Amino acid sequence: MQRARPVGTVTPAPPYRTFLRELLSFGFVGVVGTVITIFGANLMRAWLGGSPLTSVVVPTLVSTLVSYLANRFWTFRDRDSDGSGREFVIFFALNGVGMLIQVLCTGFTYYTLELHGGVSYNLSLLAGLGLGSAFRYWSYKKWVFTPAAA
């Protein structure tokens, strides 16, 4: 026989459902960020004549701001925030590491392998985004969007 819950209490979702919801939400935010980064990088590189590395950095900064807002208020909405700005600073610092991963992939392809075509540029951009995203997901859960206090 099940015990009756007091009125007004909510049963928390099983951990796997919370993980799945966060992962899918993070993935969707990542897709939006990826579109911003790839479109912006190609726009800057091809149409505005930007360097291959600057063309990665500027759109990634825009994508980072959009991603922070979407992750804070949607993906990790159930996690604590102390409102001090600490979370924002750590988020951008960790995104800096993720961006460095992207820049290293692009720089390696462009300068070391000397592959300057659009296909190789976009493949290196996607590789950097993939590796950077894996790092970001792990680091956000560990240091930025910490579990809500009991």
Image: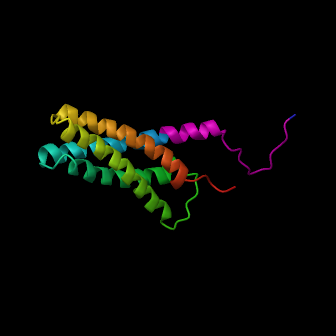
Screen quadrant of the C terminus: bottom right
Residue at the (58%, 57%) spot, across then down? 80
Quarter where residue 149 is shown: bottom right
Residue nearest the viewer, comparing 112 with 150: 112
Residue nearest the viewer, comparing 58 with 6: 58
The colour mode here is rainbow
Q: What stretch is highlighted in magenta?
A: 2-24
Magenta segment includes 6: yes
Residue nearest the viewer, comparing 75 with 51: 51
Quarter where residue 61 is shown: bottom left
Relative to 127, 136 lies left or right: right
Spot occupied by residue 8 in the image (x, y as percentages of width and height): 74, 51
Name the residue at the top extreme: 119
Relative to 122, 27 lies left or right: right
Residue at the (49%, 48%) spot, across then down? 139
Residue at the (15%, 36%) spot, across then down? 116
Observer able to see residue 36: no
Magenta segment includes 94: no
Residue nearest the viewer, comparing 66 with 128: 128
Spot occupied by residue 9 in the image (x, y as percentages of width and height): 74, 50
Screen quadrant of the N terminus: top right
Name the residue at the right extreme: 1
Spot occupied by residue 70 in the image (x, y as percentages of width and height): 44, 50
Relative to 11, 103 lies left or right: left
Spot occupied by residue 4 in the image (x, y as percentages of width and height): 83, 43
